Image: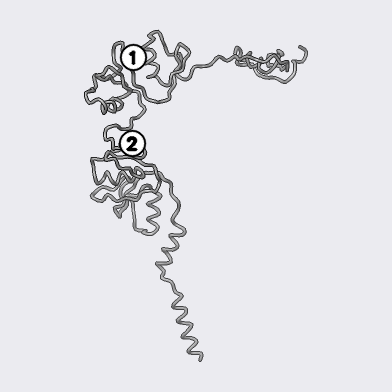
Amino acid sequence: MHRGLGLVLVMVVTMAVVDPSEALLNWRSRFCMRPCSKLYWPVCGSDRITYSNRCRFNNAKCNNPGLSIIRYDKCGGESCDRACTREYIPVCDSEGRTHSNYCIFEIAKCRDKRLRIVRYGKCQGLPDSCIRPCIKRYSPVCGSDGKTYSNECELKNAKCNNRLLELVHNGKCRGSNCNEICTLEHNPVCGSNGKTYGNKCRFEAAKCENPLLTIVNYGQCKEDCKKPCVKMYIPVCGSDEKTYGNRCELDNAKCDDPLLSFNHPGPCRGK
């Protein structure tokens, strides 16, 4: 009887033993792997897989301790496979296909070197393999149509609709033509006419119409400091020991004396 019970116990203990390698794998999956950001900073693993960032590589290493980084960039060679995030930031390629994000586009480009991005966002309508996004840099060039373009990229985009358009020279077009194509860059300048222009290019376009126009300062034009005040007597005392009819009148006085400040409510004592 005791002998039979012993055999049963041995069998139970034997069946309860877990494969050590499987236990280690479960432990790694539970305590090693961690959430990763959507940052795309590719690294190439020794398994020839491109991981979208170092964190995702480290997660893969949890299940493959022998894995190492062989290159801080995309993997080269014939394999185009890589690990991409699931973030949806679509881009449109020159074949009119929408890719979920830049990383997935790179996989397609690896297989077809002719591909390029023509739009950041989903493709709309028919594919447009000509117009492409431009940086907001002001480096003017003159086109053969007599127009000044903010940079060469803007001129090339205009050429999509006018195949005869050519670059004449770097710099703004000379002459009386004031039609200038400017970027949407917000880098304001203040003109001598008191008007704020979105950027220097837009100021130059206005100067073409008004040659006497000059830049007063880089930044928005400063508005008139003083403002109308209500005729309500709620006296306050300024740091100059003068009593002002109300806080608004004190603020207007500060326009002429920036060192002036509010002292206390009510009239100045002894005044």
Picture quadrant of residue 133: top left
Amino acid carrying label 1: it is Cys
Tell me where residue 115 appears, x and y as whole percent.
Answer: 26, 40
- The quadrant in which residue 124 appears is top left
Residue reaching furthest to the left: 164
Q: Please, what secondary structure does the residue beneath circle 2 have?
A: strand
Report x, y in % for residue 156.
27, 27
Query: In this figure, which residue is indicated by the disc labeled 1?
Result: 178
Residue 90, horizontal then vertical, whole percent: 37, 42
Residue shown at the point (39%, 51%) measured from the top left: 56
Residue at image point 26% right, 28% down: 160
What's the mark number on residue 26? Answer: none
Determine which residue is flagged by label 2: 119
Q: Is residue 131 above or below residue 98?
A: above
- SS class of the residue under badge 1? loop
Q: Residue furthest top?
A: 212
Q: Is residue 256 above or below residue 26?
A: above
In front: 194, or 100? 100
Work out which quarter of the rendered image holds the C terminus and state it.
top right
Question: Horizontal placement of 32 versus 126: left or right?
Answer: right
